[in-house]
Image (spheres, rainbow, N blue to C red):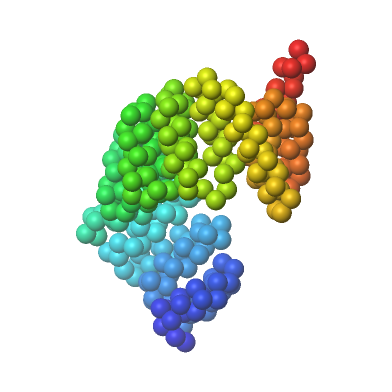
Amino acid sequence: MCALSCLSSTIALADPPVRDDVRALSAYLRSHPSDVAALIERSELYRREGNPEGALADLRVAAALAPDEPRVHAQRAVVLHAMGRHEEALAELDAYVERAPGPGPELLALRARILVRMERLDDAVADYDAALALREEVELYLERGRLLEQLGRIEDAARGYDEGLRVTDAAVLRVESIELDLRIGRADRALVHVDEGLARAPARARWLLLRARALDALARQREARAARDEALTEIERRLVRRPTAALHVERGEALLALGRADDALAAATRARSLAPRLGDAIDLELRARRAIDGGAR
C-alpha cells in the first residue's frame, strides 16, 4: 500500500465518484488506522457524499489520536456548518485559531458565512475583509458586497465591487455592480460598466439586455429597443446551434422586455421542459404570466 500522498494523487488523477474515493481510502485506513490525515480526508469525502455522521465519526477518532491537531477542528467546523449546527461550528473554528498560527482565507470565509447564518452581520463583514486581505477571490467579493447591501452600506458595497474589478476584472462582479447601480438610480454609471463589459464579451446578448435597462432608466427608449432587438437576434442565432435552457430564458427576457409576453411565456415553458427546476425559468414564467394577466385587464 502506498502512502497517503500517493493514494491521494492516484484518486485525483482518476477522478472517480466520491463513493469510489471513500472505498479506496477505507481500504488504506484498514491497514493504517492511526493515520490522522487520512481520517480527515475521508471525513471530507463523507461530507461530500451526504454522510455528515460518518464524517463526524472519523473526526472523533482523529481527535482522540491527535487532540491538538488544528485540522480536526477546521474540518469539524466545515461539517457542522453543513449540518446547520452553526454555533458548534463557530466554536470549532475558535478552537482551531487557538491551536494554529492563524486561519487562512478559506476558514475566514467559512466563519463569515457561519456568522451570517447567526445574523452577526457586522462581524461577518470583518471576516470577509480579513479573508480578502489574504486572497482576492471573486466569490468573496460577491458575498461581501451582497452582505454590505443587506446592511444598507450601499457605497461600501459599490466600492467593494470596484475593488474586485480592479483586481480580477470578473464579468460576474461587473454585472453585480451594474445591477446595484440600476437599483439605486445610477444608470449613467451602470451604462459605463455595461459598455466596458460589451467591449470584452464574446457573447453580447446579456450585456445588451443590461444596456437596454440602463438606457430605459435614462429615458433613451429608442436606443433601448434597438439593444433588445440586437440581443434577441444574437440569442436566436445561438439557439439554433445550442438550444439550452439558459438561452431560452435569455430569449424570454428579451421578448418580455419588448412587450411580447406570450412569446416570453412560451420561452419560459421551453426552458422548464429542459430544466424543470431552473430558478430563472420559473421566475420568467411568473413575470410573463403577470404581464399577460395585466394586459388582459
* Residue in the foreground of this view, choosing between 132 and 196: 196
Q: Please tell me which residue is depicted at 43% across the width and 27% down the height of the picture.
A: 188
Instruction: Indicate left or right for 19 with 129 as reference.
Output: right
**Does residue 158 appear in this view?**
yes
Residue 116 x %, y %:
39, 38
**Quadrant housing the C terminus:** top right
Horizontal relation, residue 276 to residue 145: left or right: right
User: Where 169 sits versus 211, above or below?
Assistant: below
Residue 169 position in % (x across, y down): 40, 48
- The answer to whether 69 appears left or right of 8 in the picture is left
- Residue shown at the point (74%, 38%) measured from the top left: 267
Number of numbered callouts drawn: 0
> Measured from the top left, where is residue 155 in percent x and y?
33, 29
At 30% from the left edge and 62% from the top edge, which residue is drawn? 70
Nearer the observer, 103 or 166? 166
User: Based on the displayed image, in which of its 4 quarters is residue 97 positioned?
Assistant: bottom left
Q: Nearer the viewer, residue 143 or 7?
A: 143
State whether residue 249 appears in this view. no
Place of residue 198 in the rendered image (x, y in percent of width and height, measured from the top left): 50, 43
Q: Nearer the viewer, residue 232 or 148?
A: 232
Compared to residue 161, the image places residue 109 above or below, namely below
The residue that appears at 38% across and 71% down in the rendered structure is 37
